[in-house]
Amino acid sequence: MILDSETKAVELPDEHGNELRLWLRLLTCTNLIEGEVRGRLRERFDVTLPRFDLMAQLDKAPDGMTLSDVSKRMMVSNGNVTGLVERLVESGHLDRRTSETDRRVQVIRLTRSGRAEFRKMAAEHQTWISDMFGDLSPKDVRELMRLLGKTKGSVQKSARSRAGEER
Amino acid sequence: MILDSETKAVELPDEHGNELRLWLRLLTCTNLIEGEVRGRLRERFDVTLPRFDLMAQLDKAPDGMTLSDVSKRMMVSNGNVTGLVERLVESGHLDRRTSETDRRVQVIRLTRSGRAEFRKMAAEHQTWISDMFGDLSPKDVRELMRLLGKTKGSVQKSARSRAGEER
DNA sequence: GCCAATTGCTTGAAGCCTAAAGAATTTCGG
DNA sequence: CCGAAATTCTTTAGGCTTCAAGCAATTGGC
């Protein structure tokens, strides 16, 4: 999946190659961290990353959320959430009920034990992340935040202009 | 080294949270770009990202690679490569043969048409990436490269120390 | 009130991914 | 040369993910 960032990309004198290399390095970093987090979550809590992410959303919403809300927040498809929730209800982490006012709507929330379990996971998770960024100075962290913010904006702009072109 | 008064102030309140926020932003950026790339590959060439990545590896190896080589380079499981290759052989992009000297080994390479198709995709791909990073100055790009390099090292160090602990 | 459009969710098909177990083949110590 | 160990690949079971199609309930124009 990942092209190793040290691998030489198409050799051209132009500056496009630099951006490609930057992208590959960005991807490598993310995959490295994500892989670690997945592994540790599995090892320590026998839980997958998508389930952790879903619980993280619900932890911030004591009154529960609808499946659509979750889907938007997590930026994944509706069908995806359906399956995820199904398994988390099955394992006792989530509670699910049909809305009283709109019978199309399903409201889900963490169960008491689900919340307790999530809090434990989240606490460790944060120390893992902090540890993985351990070599970066506070200044590095700020600078990375700034540059990634700029990147995010740039990508969104580019994505919007493409979306506008089609049709 | 000069520490301005601001540096310390920022450091005081729970710096773990900053690293978590950094991680989330990094993840958002990567997902944004990856999503764009997936969408465009699908739209323009009706190909998936994993297939593109596999072809990219093979393009750099005119004499072909074994499945194990591919698996290591791409950092994915063996079983995964088996299925990916199967579909790419099916679609005529890849050629596959059993090694003459070791009958356990499968050697795969791009077909003529597969290579031609890949080259077209790769060229466009590079312009997409370049476009998405368009708002970043050359200096930004260099700085991001540097900080991500540092991050990569830090994560690897942390991952190694964990791997060492679990006997 | 009626019906068409919209909204919320589920289902199904296809693909990607892993870990673990299994099969075929080669390697190597004795 | 023999058999154990290692290597290469495939298979299987389970989970995640999307898109597209479909169903049920609600809303809004008339």
Image (cartoon, coloured by chain):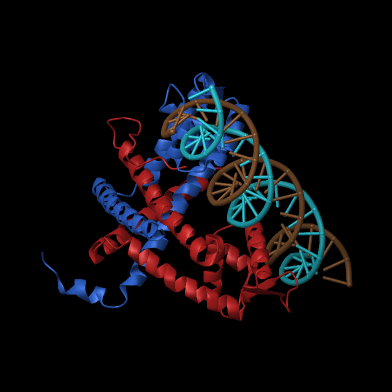
Chain colours: A red, B blue, C brown, D cyan
Please tell me which residue is depicted at 60% across the width and 81% down the height of the picture: A112
Q: Report if residue A167 is visible in the image.
A: no
Please tell me which residue is depicted at 38% across the width and 64% down the height of the picture: A129
Residue A128 image point, x, y percent = 39, 65
Residue B37 image point, x, y percent = 48, 43
Residue A159 image point, x, y percent = 47, 49
Answer with the quarter of the image where residue B48 lies: top right
Please tell me which residue is depicted at 55% across the width and 77% down the height of the picture: A115
Q: Nearer the viewer, residue A38 or A107?
A: A38
A122 left or right of A80 in image: left
Q: Nearer the viewer, residue A70 or C2?
A: A70
Q: Which image quarter is the C terminus of chain A in?
A: top right
Residue A142 image point, x, y percent = 28, 64
| Residue positioned most to the left | B1
B60 left or right of B101 in image: left
Q: Nearer the viewer, residue A118 or A164?
A: A118
Q: Is residue B109 above or below residue B38?
A: above
B107 left or right of B160 in image: right
Q: How many marks?
A: 0
Q: Report if residue A121 is visible in the image.
A: yes
